[in-house]
Structures are given as structure tokens and as C-alpha cells.
Image (cartoon, rainbow, N blue to C red):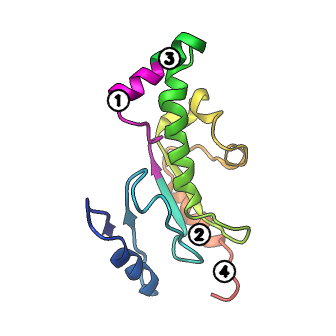
Amino acid sequence: MLLQLPGAPVEPLLARLRQNRAETLLLCGVHGGVLAEGVDYPGELAIGVFVVGPGLPKVELERELVRERFDAESGAGFEFAYLVPGLARAVQAGGRVLRGPDDVAAIVLLDRRFCEPQYFERLPAWWRDEIVRCEDPVPLLEQFFARRPARPGL
């Protein structure tokens, strides 16, 4: 298991992933952190991502002002101040493992809120078409990785 620690450099973690050929590594990071934005994991460097929660921004004065403004204008303050930015983070995290048409990876959304209409309807359409709801993702992940095609040239 590799952990993203506050202030720690990213390159040693990425170097460990690149050098690894013998074992499964779990890289733990946070929504919006340096491992979730601006870093690509090409080829087999990452074959799945667990998105724990929709990544809603923390409550703070500026965001609450945005929420109040949109509540007054359209009644959709929570949606614009919290929901849309949070789901953008979740989708971006999923996008780390699917960068091109040949990529095959598992994206596991771990939070019941992803099933609620206001969250679910704002996920990308192709995600909504592929989502499988279950209580225990382990058997489905085992099946997925058992039938996952080998990438050419790897």
C-alpha cells in the first residue's frame, strides 16, 4: 500500500508504480490532491480506482455565499456550490485510469449518494449505462479482472 502523505513528493510514489511488475499495489490519495489531478497513469500503471464519496467541497464562507446566491436565483444553491464541483472531482478521479480508447479499468463508486437521483443523473451518461449496483463489489471486481483483456504490447 502506498499512501499520499501531506507535503510528500509525488515522484517517489510514481517511480514505485512504474518499477513494480510483481505485486498489486494500492495507491491511496485524496479527491483533488496531487495524485488525482494532473498525473496520468498510462498503460497498466493503474487498472482501477475507488472513488470514496462524491468529493463535496468543505463548507466555508465563500462557498456558502455562492450557495446563497444560487438559492436566491434558482433554488439550486447546493447543486451549484457543492454537488457539481464534488462530482467533477469524482469523475476526474475516475478519468485517471481511462485516458484513451484502449484503456480498460474498474471505477468503483463507494457511497450510497451516487445512487441518489440528484447525484446519479449528473454522472457522465456512459458511466450511468455501465454502473452495476451491489452491496459487495469484490465478486464483481474478481470477475472483471478475470476477463479483462491483456493490453497489446504489455
Point out the image quarter for the N terminus.
bottom left
- Point out the tag, 4 or 2, that comes first from the N-terminus: 2
Badge 1 crowding class, 10 Å Cα cut-off, few under 14, some 14 to 19, many 20 or more, is few
- Where is the C terminus found, in terms of image quarters? bottom right
4 and 1 marks in contact (CB < 8 Å): no
Query: Is the residue under label 3 in contact with that under label 4 (CB below 8 Å)?
Result: no
Q: Earlier in the sequence, mark 4 or mark 3?
A: 3
45 left or right of 98 in image: left
Say whether residue 144 is left or right of residue 54. Answer: right
Q: CA distance from mark 1 to mark 3?
A: 15 Å
Q: Which residue is mark 2?
A: 145
Find numbered disc 4 in the image and state the secondary structure of the residue it sits on. loop
Query: Residue 125, percent across and down?
Result: 72, 43
Q: Which residues are magenta?
A: 51-67
* The label number, if any, that marks residue 150 in the structure image: 4
Does residue 149 appear left or right of residue 58 in this picture? right
